[in-house]
């Protein structure tokens, strides 16, 4: 670039009126070794911009993928456990109740049987009573 | 979206996010943290991301907001970093001739600019974004962008010329 035009573009540059392309021209001019002595002071400015754009991000990018969340597993496990306990308990209670019912029936049945046998024997008492009446009458 | 697809979208501009964060936060470590945070946020909201026409501009805006928030909370927490603009006289006098040192000097000048100007200078002169893109990213009027950019450039030039006049380099 001609010195005259460099100065014009530089003026525009300071007013914020240059295009991206013109700014690239300025950077190129000031990176060369044909820089006019009176413009030497600008050299580090454009060198700084060129250097600044070479800086790289070297950090890691720690991306979390949506892996299976094990916390939810424990929630589900507790759910299943509660469910099991509740219905298991109900089932067990029902079994116990049936067992108790059957035992009671059996016991009552035995009582009834023995009672029958008892009343058979009581029939003799009636006989005895009859006999006693006969004796009293006579 | 798989991790690979995500990285393919993000890779072209993740350095830009980092550089923007560094320009605002100054410290490399903080800028790295900020960049990671932004990438993680993008990943977490990747469903939303697919709706954006320009993911890069969106990510740049996110980074800007994130860093400005950081700076704000740092100020309110009295944890503001003090950037020493002075250089150690003895050693720097010897080194001033070196190009590296003059670049550092420009860096220091840029660090001293107001956040807004630093932001715009970064987006335009380092990343070469078009004005329309910068306007969208920063939600600013075209003239406001140009004015801030011009101020930033002139401010850097002033200090640079001063340095050039009195310095050895």
Image: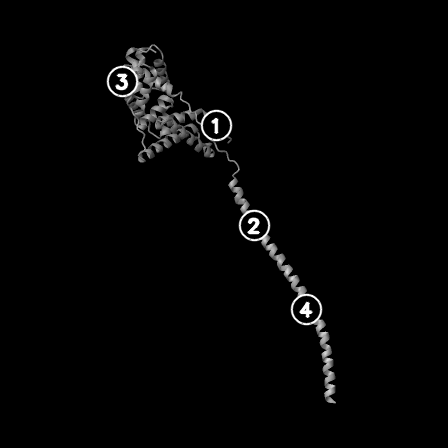
Badge 3 vs badge 1, beta-carbon distance below 8 Å:
no
Which x, y percent locates residue A70? 52, 40
Circle 1 SS class: helix
Height in image: A26 above or below B19?
above
Give the CA separation, mark 4 to mark 3: 120 Å
Q: What residue does disc 3 label?
A: B163
Say whether mark 2 and mark 4 are on the same chain. Answer: yes
Query: What scheme was used to colour the molecule?
Result: one colour
Marks counted in the figure total 4
Q: What residue does disc 4 label?
A: A111
Circle 4 SS class: helix
Give the CA separation, mark 1 to mark 2: 45 Å
- Position of A85 compared to A11: left or right? right
Identify the chain of the residue marked 1, using the numbered disc in the image: B
The foreground one among B113 and B61 is B113
Q: What residue does disc 1 label?
A: B7
Residue occupying the point 73% across, 78% down: A124
């Amino acid at each position: 670039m001609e010195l005259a035009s460099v100065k014009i573009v530089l003026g525009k540059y300071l007013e914020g009126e240059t295009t991206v392309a013109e700014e690239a021209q300025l950077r190129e001019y000031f990176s060369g070794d044909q820089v006019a002595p009176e413009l030497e002071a600008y050299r580090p400015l454009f060198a700084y911009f060129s250097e600044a754009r070479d800086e790289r991000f070297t950090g890691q990018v720690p991306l979390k993928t949506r892996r299976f969340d094990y916390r939810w597993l424990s929630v589900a496990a507790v759910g299943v456990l509660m469910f099991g306990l509740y219905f298991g308990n109900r089932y067990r209670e029902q079994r116990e109740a049936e067992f108790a019912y059957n035992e009671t029936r059996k016991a009552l049945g035995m009582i009834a049987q023995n009672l029958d046998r008892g009343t058979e024997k009581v029939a003799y008492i009636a006989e005895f009573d009859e006999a006693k009446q006969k004796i009293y009458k006579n | 979206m798989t991790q690979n697809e995500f990285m393919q979208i993000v890779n072209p501009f993740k350095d830009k996010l980092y550089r923007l964060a560094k320009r605002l936060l100054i410290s490399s470590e903080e800028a790295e943290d900020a960049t990671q945070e932004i990438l993680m946020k993008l990943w977490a909201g990747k469903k939303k991301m697919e709706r954006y026409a320009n993911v890069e501009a969106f990510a740049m805006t996110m980074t800007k907001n994130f860093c400005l928030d950081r700076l704000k909370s740092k100020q309110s927490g009295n944890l503001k970093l003090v950037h020493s603009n002075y250089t150690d006289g003895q050693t720097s006098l010897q080194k001033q001739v070196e190009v590296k040192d003059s670049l550092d000097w420009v860096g220091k000048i840029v660090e001293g600019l107001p956040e807004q100007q630093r932001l715009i200078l970064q987006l335009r002169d380092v990343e070469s974004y078009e004005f329309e893109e910068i306007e969208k990213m920063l939600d600013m009027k075209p003239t406001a962008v140009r004015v801030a950019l011009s101020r930033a450039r002139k401010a850097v030039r002033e200090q640079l010329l001063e340095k050039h006049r009195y310095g050895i380099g």
